[in-house]
Image (cartoon, rainbow, N blue to C red):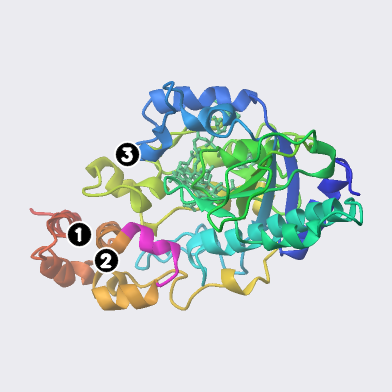
């Protein structure tokens, strides 16, 4: 029977088998970094990302503490996977006539799905290990508890609709079984089981600041650019978390290895890193090109340079990424044409081509209108007057936001005397 000390080893083995590069366990408690979250929200640094401001019935910010959003959670399993590929960094590819899509978005599969699929493997193996040992612990005259348990395998998935996460409830692990309490409500499929073993998997969308738990799970430290950095792998890591009601032995937090370095802060073209470990989304090119809808503030347009989706500069310049290894995972290999893409191609992309090219890609998030808007801004910043005829045509486009940005870009390339 695995003990609460052995389960972490089993989880890490399962994570490795599922293709994760790193895995660790963080405790659920009020971690000091989370104290900064309400200040960050109050300062307006979340911009228009209203989901970051979600509150519970008592008015507390859900992301500021798991006590509010998941009072049953006792541990957070954090898994990380390297998405780096052997392509140049944005700081190495300096053709201003071409755009830049950030490294994470070149992938063949949206990382939310690629990470979630792996998290489910880990979650299922954890469940199976606990259910198997529980079944083996039953006396032979008892009904076939293992068969009963396995009927739940993959079945009790409750969608709560608000955060689109699965809530998987399972029989209690052996060390948690107590005297039998009231019979719990049945699952949707009619089966019933004790409900005190809960797991929830999240990639981005959960009410949790993943990087803080990644630090306490020993995945890496939070750098001054606010990204999680691992000493061996660098920062090209996607994170995924499994919240669980199991009380597990936590890992040790990774020590901060930024030292006196400030390269990321110095290199940020928009001064979005307002202080070490603090980012104002409104000023971040990643936010402006992916999350911001409608018109981009003029002051930001010029500073966006040729970025059309996301930004990697504060990671490209980080010394810990100098020797970052490349992944072999096929889903993170770049789609054709996305590394340093042609701006004309993006600006003139039809709705049909956008659907086809970006099917299952994170780039869908900015929608065709956002991508074209960003491409037009990059043309304006290119200094290349070859783009003027195309921009003049786009200035008449039926999309008023695109048309206005095209007029801005034309003025930049073709200043009036
Ligand atoms: C909203 C969001 C964004 C926003 C805001 C980013 C931000 N820094 O907050 C925008 C759109 C700008 C963004 C950009 C990017 N994102 Co993003 N994003 C998220 C999301 C959904 C929430 C992050 C969040 O809660 N922010 C709130 C702030 C307050 O938290 P935080 O920055 O993590 O800050 C904590 C620490 O800095 C800490 N802190 C630690 N020490 C200290 C010391 C002091 C003095 C202070 C004041 C604070 C402090 O306090 C904060 C917690 O309260 C997460 C997924 C998730 N659910 O966590 C992904 C996530 C953070 N993003 C990710 C990625 C990959 C990116 C990009 C690289 C994508 C790109 N190339 O464009 C960039 C990186 C930009 C950057 N430098 O952060 C990854 C990060 C992986 C990693 N290695 O760190 C995540 C974890 C997604 C994932 N599942 O893999 N993102
Ligand atoms: S992603 Fe780009 S704009 Fe955002 S903080 Fe990093 S360097 Fe600055
Ligand atoms: S560039 Fe320097 S300060 Fe910034 S995250 Fe990397 S090591 Fe830390």
Query: In the rendered structure, does residue 335 fall within the stretch colored magenta?
Result: no
Residue picked out by circle 3: 48
Quick one: label 1 or label 3, which is nearer the N terminus?
A: 3
User: In percent of the image, x 88 and y 46: which residue is there?
Assistant: 6
In this view, 298 is above or below 345: above
Query: Residue 23: horizontal and vertical position, in percent?
Result: 74, 50
- Number of the front mark, 1 or 3: 3
Identify the magenta region: 359-366
Residue picked out by circle 1: 413
User: In percent of the image, x 63 and y 33: which residue is there?
Assistant: 72
Query: In the rendered structure, does residue 365 fall within the stretch colored magenta?
Result: yes
In this view, 357 is above or below 119: below
Q: Residues within 10 Å of mark 3 (few under 14, many from 20)?
A: some
Residue picked out by circle 2: 384
For mark 2, give the secondary structure: loop
Observer-nearest of 417 and 185 = 185
- Number of the front mark, 2 or 3: 3
In this view, 318 is above or below 65: below
Quick one: label 1 or label 2, which is nearer the N terminus?
A: 2
For mark 1, give the secondary structure: helix
- Taking the view exactly as shown, the residue that stands out farthest to the front is 141
Does any portion of residue 183 appear in the rendered image?
A: yes
For the residues marked 2 and 3, what is the alpha-carbon distance in whole angstroms? 33 Å
């Amino acid at each position: 029977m695995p003990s609460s000390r052995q389960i972490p080893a089993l989880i890490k083995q399962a994570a490795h088998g599922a293709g994760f590069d790193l895995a660790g366990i963080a405790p659920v408690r009020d971690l000091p970094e989370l104290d900064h979250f309400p200040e960050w929200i109050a300062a307006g640094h979340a911009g228009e990302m209203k989901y970051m401001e979600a509150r519970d019935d008592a008015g507390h910010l859900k992301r500021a503490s798991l006590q509010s959003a998941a009072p049953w959670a006792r541990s957070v399993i954090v898994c990380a996977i390297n998405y780096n590929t052997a392509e140049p960094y944005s700081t190495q590819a300096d053709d201003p006539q071409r755009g830049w899509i950030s490294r994470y978005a070149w992938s063949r599969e949206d990382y939310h799905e690629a990470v979630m699929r792996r998290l489910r493997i880990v979650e299922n193996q954890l469940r199976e290990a606990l259910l198997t040992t529980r079944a083996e612990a039953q006396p032979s005259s008892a009904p076939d508890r293992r068969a009963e348990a396995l009927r739940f395998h993959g079945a009790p998935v409750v969608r709560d609709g608000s955060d689109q996460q699965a809530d998987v409830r399972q029989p209690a692990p052996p060390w948690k079984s107590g005297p039998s309490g009231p019979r719990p409500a049945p699952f949707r499929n009619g089966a019933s089981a004790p409900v005190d073993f809960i797991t929830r998997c999240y990639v981005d969308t959960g009410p949790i600041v993943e990087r803080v738990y990644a630090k306490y799970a020993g995945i890496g430290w939070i750098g001054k650019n606010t990204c999680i950095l691992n000493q061996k792998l660098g920062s090209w890591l996607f994170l995924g978390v499994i919240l669980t009601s199991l009380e597990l032995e936590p890992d040790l937090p990774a020590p901060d290895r930024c030292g006196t370095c400030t390269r990321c802060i110095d290199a940020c073209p928009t001064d979005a890193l307002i202080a070490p470990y603090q980012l104002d989304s409104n000023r971040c090119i990643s936010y402006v090109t992916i999350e911001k809808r409608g018109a981009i503030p003029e002051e930001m347009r010029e500073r966006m340079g040729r970025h059309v989706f996301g930004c990697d500069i504060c990671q490209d310049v980080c010394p810990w990424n100098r020797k970052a290894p490349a992944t072999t995972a096929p889903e993170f290999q770049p789609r054709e044409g996305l590394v340093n893409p042609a701006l004309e191609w993006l600006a003139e992309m039809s709705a049909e081509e956008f659907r086809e090219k970006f099917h299952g890609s994170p780039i869908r998030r900015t929608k065709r209108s956002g991508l074209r808007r960003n491409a037009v801004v990059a043309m304006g910043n290119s200094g290349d007057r070859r783009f003027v005829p195309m921009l003049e045509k786009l200035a008449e486009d039926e999309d008023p936001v695109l048309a206005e940005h095209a007029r801005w870009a034309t003025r930049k390339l073709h200043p009036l005397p």
